[in-house]
Amino acid sequence: MRQASQTEARRKDTHEKIQLGGLIAKAGLRYEKRALLLGLLIDGASRIRGNETERARLLALGEKAFVDDPE
């Protein structure tokens, strides 16, 4: 039983990582260096902390991208 729950947890983790990788590709950043991608994410995280205006702006931008290209 324990092994089944560990397998399911690994499966969910793998699925989440694949989805996150898909977001990188969708953003047109597939061929950028990993350090640059991490830097972008760190910068973005710091920009939205405590800044609801920036959070809302970026959320709207992302939602529009999904509507424009639902893949």
Image (tube, rainbow, N blue to C red):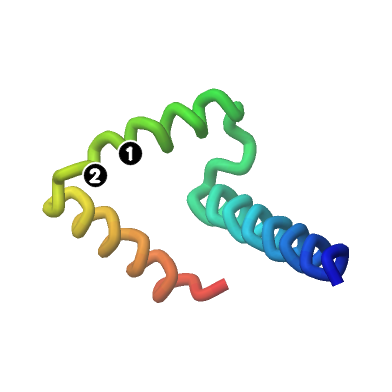
Q: Quadrant of residue 68?
A: bottom left
- Residue drawn at 51 percent across, 75 percent down: 70
Question: Is 44 left or right of 32, judged from the image as shown?
Answer: left
Between 9 and 55, the residue placed more toward the observer is: 9
Q: Secondary structure at mark 2?
A: helix
Q: Quadrant of residue 40?
A: top left
Q: Is the C-beta separation of discs 1 and 2 under 8 Å?
A: yes
Q: Which residue is mark 2?
A: 48
Category of crowding for the residue at label 1, using alpha-carbon neighbours closer than 10 angstroms: few (below 14), some (14–19), many (at least 20): some
Q: Secondary structure at mark 1?
A: helix
- Residue 44: give its label: 1
Q: Quadrant of the C terminus?
A: bottom right
Between the residue at mark 1 and the residue at mark 2, the CA separation in whole angstroms equals 6 Å
Q: Residue furthest top?
A: 35
Between 49 and 31, the residue placed more toward the observer is: 49
In this rendering, the count of numbered labels is: 2
Kind of residue sitting beneath label 1 = Gly
- Residue drawn at 54 percent across, 55 percent down: 23
Kind of residue sitting beneath label 2 = Ile
